[in-house]
Amino acid sequence: MKISVHYTYKIPKSEAVECMTEELEITDALALEKDLHKVNRIHAITFRDSNGQERLRKELKTYIEKVETEPHNVHVYFDGGYGESSRQSGLGCTIYYDKNGETFRIRKNALVEELVSSNEAEYAALHLAVQELEMLGVRYLPVEISGDSKLVINQMKEEWPCYDDTLLSWADRIDAKLQVLGVTATYKHIPRAENREADRFASPGA
């Protein structure tokens, strides 16, 4: 959850000005509020989430305590491979996350036969990763998703158009699932060399 800080600044011999910050991590927002209270001209400090709902300081502190016991700082790597001769597709994903002060890793792979291209295998691998997020219990958190497929990454970022109905169907399913989970995904294209773990699990027959 991201939080913006809203406050009133009283300019000497002038009217007060309503101010707000960009969206911040909760810990940063709470630290800023503490500093703002030291400035005499600043009043009426409030917190608001991404939906514009006002949040109490106590509520934000409780949220932080709860997050520490649940998966957070989640980073997903995915890759899909398609064998022209075997007509089989390998799907692979690796998920890193923090919980209770420790870092964990989940690796998942699958072998499927109903796909028809390497691009579809890439989308299916991303869908597999999102399903793993659901099973892990990731809810209402930002998640960074990395892959070496420029096509999938740029289409999911809506920077490239998708004219293939099959791929568009995969993208819609992924978006719908992320929306249900309340996950805000940030997509990042990485070189294959930085995606070796997911790539290894994505080889057909791995």
Image: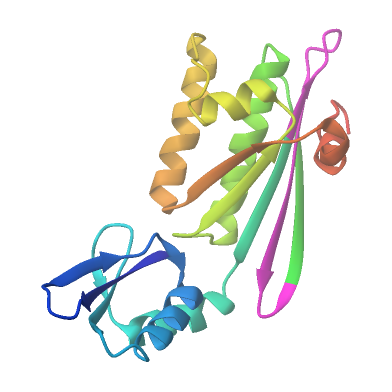
Side of 73 relative to 2 (left or right) = right
In the image, taking residue 88 as reference, residue 158 lies left or right, namely left
Find residue 192 and report its horizontal and vertical position in percent. 83, 31
- In the depicted structure, whether residue 57 falls above or below residue 79: below
Q: Is residue 150 above or below residue 200?
A: above
Q: Residue at x 86, y 29 (%)?
A: 203
Position of residue 126 measured from the top left corner of the image (x, y, whole percent):
63, 35
User: Measured from the top left, where is residue 34 in percent x and y?
Assistant: 41, 88
User: Is 96 on the left-hand or right-hand side of 1?
Assistant: right
Q: How is the image coloured?
A: rainbow
Residue at x 54% of width, y 18% of height:
167
The residue most toward the front is: 13
Q: Residue at x 66, y 80 (%)?
A: 100
Residue 14 lies in magenta, yes or no? no
- Quadrant (top left, top right, bottom left, bottom right) of the C terminus: top right
Q: Main secondary structure of the magenta part?
A: strand
**In the picture provided, is 108 more to the left or to the right than 99?**
right
Q: Residue at x 18, y 69 (%)?
A: 17
Region in magenta: 79-102
